Image: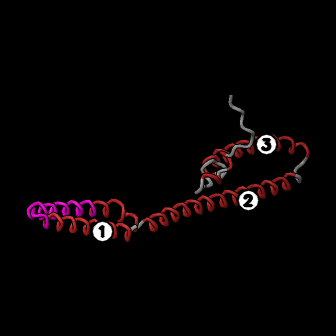
């Protein structure tokens, strides 16, 4: 893009110079000189505006895209780490529940029934707390997976036939 812009600006300067020389040869030297200076200033200003608007940002575009992708990757890695921590916590809780169930088998029969009701109430309360925590950090939410290309988002794919239009 930079080379194309430079080539076009050089060609425009050459055309203005040739046209100014032709005007000067036709015995209108003042008009040729005025045209030369005015048009070269206009071409210079337009070239500078094009450079600052398109060329300079285009030179850094690859770095900008790389930085955006790096930020997205950091977000995905952080969410993955949080999900792994959630899974480990869930696994530890399951292990602790099985250990408690084994310890409960040693209790006398009349105590076991009361304890079971108490354990069930505690377990239900803990499950609701875990579910509330998990709702904030579960990866099943719609924004866990970052799709860089829209065609990879399978939830937006059309899976049925389209209706015929009359």
The image quarter in which residue 4 lies? bottom left
Which residue occupies the foreground of this view, 111 or 120?
120
Q: How is the image coloured?
A: secondary structure
Dot 2: few (<14), some (14–19), or many (≥20) neighbours within 10 Å?
Answer: few
Where disc 1 sits, the SS reads helix
Give the quadrant of the C terminus.
top right
Dot 3: few (<14), some (14–19), or many (≥20) neighbours within 10 Å?
Answer: few
- The total of numbered circles placed on residues is 3
The span from disc 2 to disc 1 (Cα, nearest Å) is 73 Å
Query: Where does residue 99 sit, x and y in percent of width and height?
Result: 81, 57
Using the rendered image of the protein, determine whether residue 146 is visible from the camera's viewpoint. no
Residue drawn at 70 percent across, 58 percent down: 87
Where disc 3 sits, the SS reads helix
Which residue occupies the foreground of this view, 88 or 140?
140
Give the quadrant of the N terminus.
bottom left
In this rendering, position of residue 27 left or right of residue 77: left
Give the residue at mark 3. Answer: 120
Give the residue at mark 2. Answer: 92
Magenta residues (range): 25-47
Is 135 included in the stretch rendered in magenta? no
Using the rendered image of the protein, determine whether residue 103 is visible from the camera's viewpoint. yes
Between marks 1 and 3 in the image, the one whose residue lies nearer the viewer: 1
Residue drawn at 54 percent across, 60 percent down: 72
Residue located farthest toward the top when viewing the structure as drawn:
166
User: Of the residues under marks 1 and 3, which one precedes in the sequence?
Assistant: 1
Which residue occupies the foreground of this view, 12 or 26?
26
Dot 1: few (<14), some (14–19), or many (≥20) neighbours within 10 Å?
Answer: few
């Amino acid at each position: 893009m930079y080379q194309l812009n430079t080539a076009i600006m050089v060609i425009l300067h050459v055309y203005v110079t040739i046209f100014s020389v032709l005007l000067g040869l036709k015995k209108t030297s003042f008009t040729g000189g005025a045209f030369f200076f005015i048009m070269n200033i206009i071409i210079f200003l337009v070239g500078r505006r094009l450079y600052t608007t398109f060329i300079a940002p285009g030179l850094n575009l690859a770095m900008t895209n790389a930085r955006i992708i790096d930020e997205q990757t950091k977000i995905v890695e952080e969410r993955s780490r949080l999900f792994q921590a959630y899974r480990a916590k869930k696994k530890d809780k399951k292990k602790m529940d099985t250990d408690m169930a084994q310890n409960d088998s040693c209790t006398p029969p009349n105590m076991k029934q009361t304890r079971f009701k108490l354990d069930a109430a505690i377990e239900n309360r803990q499950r609701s707390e875990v579910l509330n925590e998990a709702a904030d950090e579960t990866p099943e939410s719609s924004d866990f997976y970052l799709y860089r290309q829209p065609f990879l988002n399978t939830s937006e794919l059309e899976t049925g036939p389209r209706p015929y239009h009359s």
